[in-house]
Image: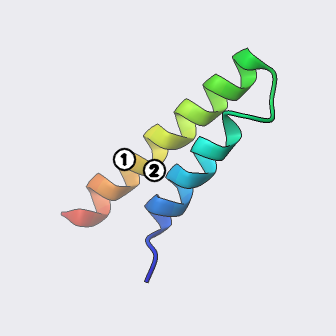
Amino acid sequence: MVRLSTIVILVGLVRFTPLPPPLGIVLGASLVLAGVALRVFTDK
């Protein structure tokens, strides 16, 4: 079973590439952070 947080992190990493630099970095980083937060909360 793949965790939702893993999917969110992977999507965040993929988002780094296609968008223009400021948008891609901000969106990707926020998605990765959201995935990490999800993982922390679901692992408790």
- In this rendering, would 3 be left or right of 10? left
- In this rendering, would 35 be left or right of 30? left
Residue reaching furthest bottom? 1
Name the disc covering residue 35, or none.
2
Residue reaching furthest left? 44
Q: Position of residue 30 (x, y in %)?
A: 54, 34
Residue reaching furthest front? 17
Q: Position of residue 7 (x, y in %)?
A: 54, 62
- Badge 2, how many Cα within 10 Å: few under 14, some, many 20+? many
Q: Are marks 1 and 2 in contact (CB under 8 Å)?
A: yes
Q: Disc 1 and disc 2: Cα gap in Å?
A: 5 Å
- Badge 1, how many Cα within 10 Å: few under 14, some, many 20+? few
Name the disc covering residue 37, or none.
1
* Secondary structure category for the residue under label 2: helix
Q: Residue at x 80, y 35 (%)?
A: 18
- In this rendering, would 37 be left or right of 40? right
Q: Residue at x 54, y 31 (%)?
A: 29
Reply above or below: 3 against 26. Answer: below
Reply above or below: 10 against 23. Answer: below
Considering the image in quadrants, where does the N terminus appear? bottom left
